[in-house]
Amino acid sequence: MSPEERARNLLIEAESTPDPAPARTAIDAVLVLDEPTGDLVLRADRLWTLLPEEGRGTLADRYRGARLAMLRGESGRALERLPPVDKTPDTRLYRDALALHAELLTFHGPTMDALLARVELDPYLVDRPEVQSANQQAIWRLLAALAPTGHRGLDALEESAQIHGWTGLFRALREAGTDPDAFEEAVADWKRAHPRHPGQLLVPELREAVLRPVDPPGRVAVLLPLTGPLADLGNALLEGIAAQFYEAHGTGTSLLILDTAGQEDLADAAYRNALQQGADRVIGPLVREAVDRVATIDSSVPTLLLNHPSRPLQTPFWVLSLSPEDDARAVADRAHGLGSDRALVLVPEGAFGDRVATAFRESFERQDGRVTAEHRFEARSPDINARIGTALGIDASEQRIQRVRRQTRLELEADAQIRSDIDMIFVAGSAADLRLVVPHLHYHRADQLPMLATSHVYEGRPQPDLDLDLSGIRFPDAPWLHPDLNPDPGLLAELASTEEIDTAASRLPRFAALGIDAMDVAAELPLYGRAPHLEVSGVAGTWQQHPPTRNWVRQPAWLEFHAGRIRPAPMHAAAPRED
């Protein structure tokens, strides 16, 4: 009798009795098959749902149910059936269940839970070196995917030598970068601190990944909208890309420039043209519809897209972009780092406000923060002061004062106070809008709280007379825009406008900075693909990989307005205001 025939017979027997024991035997017979047919899996799954509820609470049954769901292609249901895995005397069952749980969490998240599950699993794989190697590589990618706040959360875990060893190795090698001597020194120091840590097994792979040379690009194709409504933006990017190309990669390398005019059909044709002409790196396209189109092309050429796609990406595509949503997420991270967990959100009416408010709220809440209130404004509204006061709770405070006066019949001397259920303010909008809004925050004394904005609050050049009322506002931005932070002032001067030439890079400096960084990242994409801990210190910020989404996440510089000018923002919670 074949294993499949035996499984069918056991299913028939189990389906004819309410006893759970034959059902478990039949399910196990299906699960051991190399490729069980759909009807066998469906029948086994039906039997699993009929097991007594208290029986399905055992790890063995939860594991059976999760494996059946996986065979049906329902990983989300598998995760529901296999909640956190408790230790059991059956070591093999514990290992296998933990391995499946870690796999499911790696796909569905949260990242922190997936990482902890894989670290817990690792010691149980010592007799399966290939499986352990794959698990440790997954640990490394999850460490790269973890946000800075997540790393701080790992530091707070007590009595977790294994996870502290992993994070220590990750940080040491991130700091060492691609310098061979720094790599070896970092490893030696780490081994002394963690002499028996299992991560030592991964070190040879990491050494090979980091120190193996990368063939320099021979031809770099750039796909940008150089004509049409987005021409100014595309040309600012191109000026940055070209400047860095000729400074760092010009010898022996050619630059192929293709105009997409912001159209998806032209972007598709340009990408295919680039492949035909032998491009071994591609930067672009920029417009989301064009990005979605290009990302479906079958290609093995490392490609750096300049906008987020609508669908998950596969090799060889990566994303490096500046977006309002990214700024809002950076604000949420900064607020959390300052110790804030109750936010007031003030954003303009319309699509921009909706986008940044949603991105901020989702990121802030993932870090256990709470958006206490959210208000939309029209900066030029004649009653903007009253609207801002309402958002801050001034009206409610005044009503409480009046109520106490009536009840006590006393003339109380009291000033209305801002609401007590917020400890930071996220305000977004253009510089022109916020010059009209922020003075009202000052008027109501809201500047006693951290006030964080997106980079749109700063137009990219000193205008102290115009920006005087923005004092105290902090925002994430490119180091490129501040003389004390810019790592390449010579390149900034090269791209500056003159009396004879007005450059797009000067009009849109942030996108010129993005172009510079895009050129550097694209040239080394094969290296970064195999060494996800590496970061890139660029002129737009420090870029770190997020392997699950194939996205490069920017750690921006933090600036604040002071007497109408910008300066590096302090790390403490409250920014002083100048009267």
Image (cartoon, helix red, strand yellow):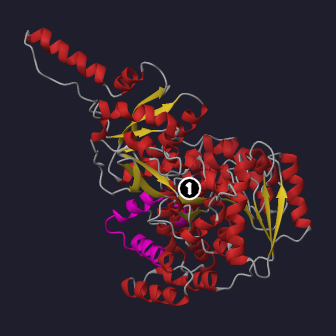
Does 488 appear above or below 234?
Answer: below
Looking at the image, is 519 positioned above or below residue 319? below
Residue at 54% of width from left, 56% of height from top? 60
Tell me residue 65's x, y (percent): 61, 50
Label 1 crowding class (10 Å Cα cut-off): few <14, some 14-19, many 20+?
Answer: many
**Which amino acid type is marked by label 1?**
Leu
| Residue displayed at 83% across by 54% down | 259
> Farthest residue toward the front?
499
Magenta segment's dominant SS is: helix
Q: Does any portion of residue 526 appear in the rendered image?
A: no
Determine whether, in the image, residue 549 is placed left or right of residue 36: left
Q: Say which residue label 1 marks.
A: 105
Quadrant containing the C terminus in the rendered view: top left
Callout 1 secondary element: helix
> What span is in magenta?
144-172
Q: Is residue 219 left or right of residue 324?
A: right
Residue under the point 65% across and 41% down: 17
Instruction: Point out residue 500 in the picture as x, y percentages from the top left corner.
Output: 70, 58
Residue 156 part of the magenta segment:
yes
Image spot of residue 3 (x, y percent) = 78, 62
Q: How many marks?
A: 1
Query: Which quarter of the figure has residue 426?
Result: top left
Which residue occupies 68% across, 47% down? 74
Does residue 37 show up? yes
The relative height of residue 320 versus residue 243 in the rendered view (above or below) is above
User: Which of the pair 482/518 is nearer the observer?
Assistant: 482
Residue nearest the viewer, comparing 108 with 537: 537
Rendered image quadrant of residue 7: bottom right
Q: Position of residue 91 (x, y in %)?
A: 49, 69
Q: Magenta span has 525?
A: no
